[in-house]
Image (cartoon, grey):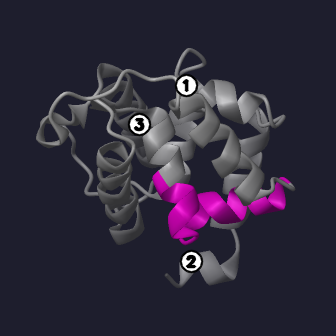
């Protein structure tokens, strides 16, 4: 299924997304849970991209948590699993990582994967903050060309 491994930060974001699902007593790990995980870690390239786009991470977290309050409650906290939406986002993230010739799937690729699926919850939330796929991709390409990035 996936050819590239997740970066340590991307894996931490996925793990954190699963923890958020349990904390919020939800059924599925969706794209908004992943975005929440990325934002709450405050590490990796996706938060840098959002910062460069003048996004207030705390305001974005508050918006996501507000949207998630309307989700279906889980009957058994041990049952949480990835939603089909999240699998699609992760597949799109891998494609972006391959296109950008990365050795792993990073949080920045996950951000692009979210934005490439305009029907997913994370994309809708990001759009409400004025974040578009084109703008995010431009910032990511700029970051990838920085010498500091190349040494990581």
- As for residue 104 lying within the magenta part, the answer is no
Secondary structure at badge 1 equals helix
Find the distance from the CA under tag 3 to the CA under tag 2. 20 Å
84 to 46, vertically: above or below: above
Dot 3 alpha-carbon crowd within 10 angstroms: few under 14, some 14 to 19, many 20 or more? some
Q: Residue at x 29, y 57 (%)?
A: 15
Instruction: Out of 99 and 116, give the one closest to the viewer.
Output: 116
Horizontal and vertical percent position of residue 64: 61, 39
Q: In the rendered image, which quarter is residue 140 located in?
A: bottom right
Quarter of the figure with the N terminus: top left
Res 96 seen here:
no
Secondary structure at badge 3 equals helix
Instruction: Out of 95 and 44, give the one closest to the viewer.
Output: 44
Residue closest to the far top = 119
Q: Nearer the viewer, mark 1 or mark 2?
A: 1
Dot 2 alpha-carbon crowd within 10 angstroms: few under 14, some 14 to 19, many 20 or more? few
Horizontal and vertical percent position of residue 69: 52, 31
Q: In the rendered image, which quarter is residue 2 located in?
A: top left
Query: Which residue has dot 3 on it?
Result: 95
Asked if the residue at tag 2 contacts the one at tag 1, i.e. Cβ–Cβ closer than 8 Å, the answer is no
Query: Which residue has dot 2 on it?
Result: 150
Find the distance from the CA under tag 1 to the CA under tag 3. 20 Å
Res 29 seen here:
yes
Q: Which mark is residue 121?
A: 1
Q: Which residues are magenta?
A: 37-53
Find the distance from the CA under tag 1 to the CA under tag 2. 32 Å
Q: Residue at x 36, y 61 (%)?
A: 103
Q: Residue at x 56, y 77 (%)?
A: 150
């Amino acid at each position: 299924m996936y050819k590239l491994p997740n970066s340590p930060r991307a894996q931490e974001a996925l793990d954190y997304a699963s923890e958020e699902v349990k904390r919020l007593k939800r059924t599925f790990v969706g794209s908004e849970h992943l975005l929440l995980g990325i934002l709450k870690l405050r590490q990796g390239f996706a938060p840098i991209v959002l910062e460069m786009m003048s996004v207030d991470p705390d305001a974005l977290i508050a918006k996501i948590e507000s949207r998630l309050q309307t989700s279906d409650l889980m009957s058994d906290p041990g049952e949480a699993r990835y939603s089909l939406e999240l699998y699609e986002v992760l597949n799109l993230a891998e494609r972006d990582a391959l296109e950008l010739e990365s050795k792993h799937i990073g949080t920045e690729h996950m951000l692009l994967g979210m934005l490439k699926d305009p029907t997913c919850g994370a994309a809708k939330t990001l759009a409400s903050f004025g974040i578009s796929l084109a703008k995010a991709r431009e910032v990511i390409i700029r970051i990838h060309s920085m010498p500091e990035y190349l040494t990581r």
